[in-house]
Image (cartoon, rainbow, N blue to C red):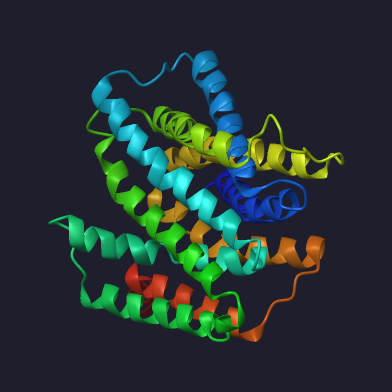
């Protein structure tokens, strides 16, 4: 594979791993829904410019937009909100580890809601290892962080539903960047009335220091809009198998950034849980068997 693709993969892992860092910094001056709404609204604006300048065009038709509305709820509004809520109680690194369970939930959702993707013995082993890792991480969570762990798992489950739901867009003729814009625009509209009622942006005290707003800008532009652009380019150039490696790298990026920038602690049980989750992902996609062959 070309060296440029490896560079893109590393950048993507930093962008998505950095999203957890940006959230931690934004929480130092902004409420949860303000962070989430500014993230999706800003990213939708950037991608709208991208589609316009690239001559790609926007999604059209009521059927497409109804599907995009649910996609925006499942892939942006719900998980983004749950992760920000959770990061008020747990570290960026731990949130990123729990985010790595997304493929586990996707397998379960696909098993229940599709006819062609049922759980095989290898996938069952992977699920057992992965959720054993979650139990290891959650041990001790009863002291106050268990709800935050559950929020992260709920966000990962929502991503799993989104992954299965998103398969309908290719037959509709929608291009990947149109889907990315459509779901971000939809989540912006979904969250707007909730944000207006709960955070009351016209009346709330916005942070005087630039740090939290700068963090949201980074979250919106780098970790959302730019990340989607790189993701879909890498998918076209290198394929889904190679791109799946980003799942394994994101926790390392997030943990490293959390330790270096925020001096966050990393507990042994978190690393053990991460090892079990990653082992489960390896078992599910057959990498162990390929390595033995």
Q: Do we see residue 280 in this rendering?
A: yes
Q: Residue at x 86, y 39 (%)?
A: 208
Q: Nearer the viewer, residue 192 or 289?
A: 192
Residue 40: image location, x then y, percent: 55, 36
User: How many badges with numbers are in the image?
Assistant: 0
In the image, is 278 to the left or to the right of 89? left
Q: Residue at x 60, y 38 (%)?
A: 39
Q: Is residue 157 above or below residue 291?
A: above
Q: Do we see residue 238 in this rendering?
A: no
Looking at the image, which residue sits at the far right? 209
Q: Nearer the viewer, residue 14 or 150?
A: 150
Looking at the image, which residue sits at the far left? 115
Q: Is residue 145 above or below residue 48?
A: below
Residue 45: image location, x then y, percent: 57, 24
Can you say which quadrant of the picture contains the C terminus? bottom left
In the image, is 37 to the left or to the right of 88? left
Residue 247: image location, x then y, percent: 50, 60
Q: Residue at x 55, y 22 (%)?
A: 50
Q: Is residue 1 above or below residue 214?
A: below
Residue 221: image location, x then y, percent: 65, 35
Q: Residue at x 71, y 52 (%)?
A: 27
């Amino acid at each position: 594979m070309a060296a440029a693709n490896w560079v893109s993969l590393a950048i993507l892992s930093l962008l998505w791993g950095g999203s957890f860092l940006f959230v931690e910094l934004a929480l130092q001056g902004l409420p949860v829904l303000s962070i989430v709404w500014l993230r999706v609204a800003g990213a939708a604006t950037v991608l709208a410019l991208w589609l316009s300048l690239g001559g790609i065009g926007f999604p059209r038709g009521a059927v497409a937009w109804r599907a995009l509305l649910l996609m925006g709820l499942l892939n942006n509004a719900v998980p983004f909100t749950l992760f920000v809520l959770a990061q008020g109680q747990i570290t960026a690194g731990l949130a990123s580890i729990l985010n790595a369970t997304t493929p586990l939930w996707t397998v379960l959702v696909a098993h229940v809601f599709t006819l062609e993707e049922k759980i095989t013995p290898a996938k069952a082993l992977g699920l057992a290892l992965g959720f054993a890792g979650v139990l290891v991480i959650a041990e001790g969570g009863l002291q106050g962080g268990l709800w935050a762990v559950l929020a992260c798992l709920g966000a990962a489950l929502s991503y799993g539903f989104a992954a299965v739901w998103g398969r309908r867009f290719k037959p509709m003729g929608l291009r990947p960047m149109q889907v990315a814009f459509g779901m971000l625009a939809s989540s912006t509209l979904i969250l707007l009335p909730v944000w207006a009622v709960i955070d009351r942006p016209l009346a709330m005290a916005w942070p005087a220091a630039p740090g939290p707003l700068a963090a949201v800008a980074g979250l919106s532009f780098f970790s959302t809009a730019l990340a989607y652009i790189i993701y879909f380019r890498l998918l076209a150039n290198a394929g889904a198998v190679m791109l799946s490696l980003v799942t394994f790298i994101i926790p390392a990026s997030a943990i490293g950034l959390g330790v270096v920038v925020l001096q966050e602690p990393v507990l042994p049980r978190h690393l053990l849980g991460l090892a079990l989750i990653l082992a489960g992902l390896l078992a599910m996609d057959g990498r162990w068997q390929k390595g033995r062959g």
